[in-house]
Image (cartoon, rainbow, N blue to C red):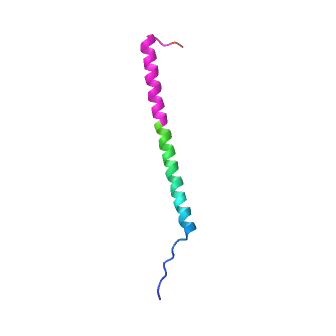
Amino acid sequence: MKRQIIKPSKTQRFKKQRRNCEEENERLREFSLKLFKEGYKLGFKKGYNEAIEKTGKIEG
């Protein structure tokens, strides 16, 4: 008796590919947000430090 290999339908392949793309997009979104936060912190620190150097004091 031969065994038949069941191939996934086009719909199943499409759904799997879509799920993989959604997972990759979420991973990239999280990575981009992390980069943005770090860049913002660095930019803020740089601007803050330059303002301190120019004014020589902290106003508050």
By secondary structure, the bulk of the magenta-drawn segment is best described as: helix
Q: Furthest residue to the front?
A: 10
Q: Is residue 4 above or below residue 23?
A: below
Q: Furthest residue to the top?
A: 56
Q: Is residue 58 above or below residue 40?
A: above
Residue 51 is covered by the magenta coloring? yes
Q: Position of residue 45 (x, y in %)?
A: 45, 24
Residue pictured at 50% horizontal, 44% vertical: 30
Query: In the rendered view of the protein, which quadrant contains the C terminus?
Result: top right
Q: Position of residue 15 (x, y in %)?
A: 56, 62
Residue 49 is covered by the magenta coloring? yes
Rendered image quadrant of residue 14: bottom right
Give left or right: position of 26 versus 42: right
Depth check: 37 or 11 in front?
A: 11
Q: Furthest residue to the right?
A: 11
Span shown in magenta: 36-58
Residue pictured at 47% horizontal, 86% vertical: 2
Q: Position of residue 58 (x, y in %)?
A: 48, 13
Labels in figure, total: 0
Q: Is residue 58 above or below residue 6?
A: above
Residue pictured at 47% horizontal, 43% vertical: 31
Q: Is residue 8 above or below residue 43?
A: below
Q: Position of residue 7 (x, y in %)?
A: 51, 74
Residue pictured at 54% horizontal, 58% vertical: 19
